[in-house]
Image: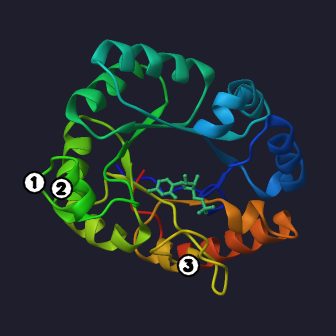
């Protein structure tokens, strides 16, 4: 059954910084304004797994954005390690074998598996160049359905696609959306940006935000403003997924 998510934990700050010291300083500065952090490959390969363990120990939620994709045994064992570490979310590429292996690897733990459908930096011609016949929309929908069928928990997608996917697939899939920009913020290299409130209204469960917080003159203030927007929008549109 769908359970509402605490609006304050729906902001996930992407710790896209080159070293653990900078990440640590940012976490300290953000204090209790942020409860959920995403650690991607850059920081993880730079010593970030210890940081992830420490964050979990301090009561924060951790999203390891490792985008696993390998033979099933390797994915299953790697996922079990991530579950042992205490992470809340882990990404894997949304291929049926990989999803099934990750679901097996997290058995008996609270770790949620998120499928990466199609990178938002890919368009139809990139898929064709990689040998796929399907275009982006068809592929995103197919992989979202396969994520559900495998017993995984959610997908990463642009908030611009959230309303359509939510309508197609119902309330049981967690929708986690990057490409979020508060009104008036710099888009940076994101192509399809959506404000925090609009993303929540479109059906997103969690918002991944990097530079609008990490590169802000006052990161804590920026995070508090985004959480306020989420809380306001969530009052009108409670999260449909659990
Ligand atoms: O700084 P910004 O808010 O653009 O950061 C967005 C974060 O979400 C980055 O960590 C980026 O790698 C991640 N992401 C994304 N688009 C995807 C998948 C992940 O921007 N399709």
Q: Nearer the viewer, residue 84 or 242?
A: 84
SS of the residue under disc 2: helix
Residue 84 in the image: above or below residue 22: above
Q: Nearer the viewer, residue 158 or 199?
A: 158
Q: Which mark is residue 195?
A: 3
Q: CA distance from mark 1 to mark 3?
A: 32 Å
**What is the number of callouts on the image?**
3
The answer to which of marks 2 and 3 sits earlier in the sequence is: 2
Residue at the disc numbered 1: 133
Q: Residue at x 20, y 58 (%)?
A: 141
| Disc 2 within 8 angstroms of ligand 1 (CB) | no
Q: Is residue 92 left or right of residue 43?
A: left
Residue at the disc numbered 2: 128
Q: Residue at x 18, y 55 (%)?
A: 128
Q: Residue at x 39, y 56 (%)?
A: 241
Residue 126, quarter of the rendered image = bottom left
Circles 1, 2 touching at the beta carbon (< 8 Å): yes
Q: Is residue 66 left or right of residue 124?
A: right
Q: Residue at x 41, y 65 (%)?
A: 158
Circles 1, 3 touching at the beta carbon (< 8 Å): no
Q: Nearer the viewer, residue 234 or 101?
A: 101
Ligand 1, image quadrant it occupies: bottom right
């Amino acid at each position: 059954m769908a359970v509402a998510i605490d609006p304050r934990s729906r902001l996930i700050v992407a710790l896209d910084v080159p070293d653990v010291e900078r990440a640590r300083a940012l976490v300290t500065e953000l204090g209790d304004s942020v409860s959920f952090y995403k650690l991607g490959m850059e920081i993880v390969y730079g010593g970030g797994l210890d940081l992830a363990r420490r964050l979990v120990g301090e009561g924060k939620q951790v999203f390891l954005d490792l985008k696993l994709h390998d033979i099933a045994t390797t994915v299953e064992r790697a996922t079990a390690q991530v579950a042992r570490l205490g992470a809340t979310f882990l990404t894997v590429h949304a291929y049926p074998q990989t999803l099934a292996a990750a679901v097996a690897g997290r058995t008996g733990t609270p770790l949620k598996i998120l499928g990466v459908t199609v990178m938002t930096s890919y368009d139809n011609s990139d898929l064709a160049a990689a040998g796929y016949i399907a275009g982006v929309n068809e592929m995103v929908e197919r992989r979202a359905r396969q994520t559900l069928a495998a017993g995984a928990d959610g997908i990463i997608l642009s908030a611009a696609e959230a309303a359509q996917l939510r309508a197609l697939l119902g309330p049981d899939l967690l929708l986690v959306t990057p490409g979020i920009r508060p009104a008036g913020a710099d888009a940076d290299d994101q192509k399809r940006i959506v404000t925090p409130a609009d993303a929540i209204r479109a059906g997103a469960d969690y918002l991944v935000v990097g530079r609008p917080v990490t590169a802000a003159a006052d990161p804590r203030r920026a995070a508090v403003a985004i959480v306020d927007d989420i809380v306001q929008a969530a009052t009108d549109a409670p999260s449909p997924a659990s």
